[in-house]
Image: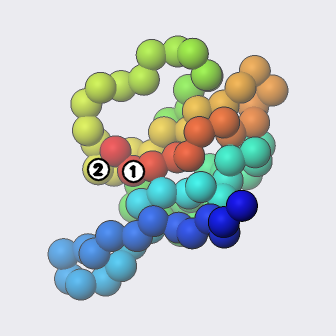
Amino acid sequence: MGRLTAVVAAAGDGEMVKTAWPEVVGWMQLNAAFQINRDRPDVHVAFYMQGTPLPTDHDGSRVIIVSDAGTVVVKTPVVG
């Protein structure tokens, strides 16, 4: 299996910013949220349980964490 890498995008000033956290899949949701906030203090984290409807609007300052009933992250969190 290949090595997972972080997804980054260019910010307006040319600086690269992280936009996805594949490495936190399998982590406890709070640990994942702490990592996301360390990497991107400019975004807020929203928590959803697997199977619940997710927001359909795009929000460039939001990262959604989807977890199972045991609060383990089951989907790669991304900005939007």
Q: Who comes first in sequence, dot 2 or dot 1?
A: 2
- Residues at marks 2 and 1 touching, judged by CB atoms closer than 8 Å: yes
**What count of labels does the image hold?**
2
9 left or right, relative to 66: left
Q: Which mark is residue 41?
A: none
Across and down, in percent, residue 22 comes to 59, 55
Callout 1, which amino acid?
Answer: Val
Which residue is found at the position 18% from the left and 75% from the top? 12
> Which residue is disc 1 drawn over?
79
Quarter of image, res 36:
bottom right
In terms of depth relative to the viewer, which is nearer, 8 or 58?
Answer: 8
Q: Is residue 8 left or right of residue 14?
A: right
Q: Secondary structure at mark 1?
A: loop
Quarter of the figure with the N terminus = bottom right
User: Which residue has dot 2 on it?
Assistant: 60
Q: Residue farthest to the left?
A: 12
Residue with the most extreme front position? 1
Left or right of 52 on screen, residue 72 = right
Residue lying at the far top in this picture: please name it: 52
Single out the residue that lies furthest toward the bottom: 14
As drawn, 7 above or below 15: above
The residue under the point 56% across, 57% down is: 21
Badge 2 marks a residue whose secondary structure is loop
User: 50 above or below 5?
Assistant: above
Which residue is painted at 66% across and 36% down in the image? Answer: 74
Q: CA distance from mark 2 to mark 1?
A: 6 Å
Nearest to the observer: residue 3 or residue 40: 3
* Identity, as a three-letter code, of the amino acid under mark 2: Gly
Q: Is residue 38 above or below residue 15?
A: above
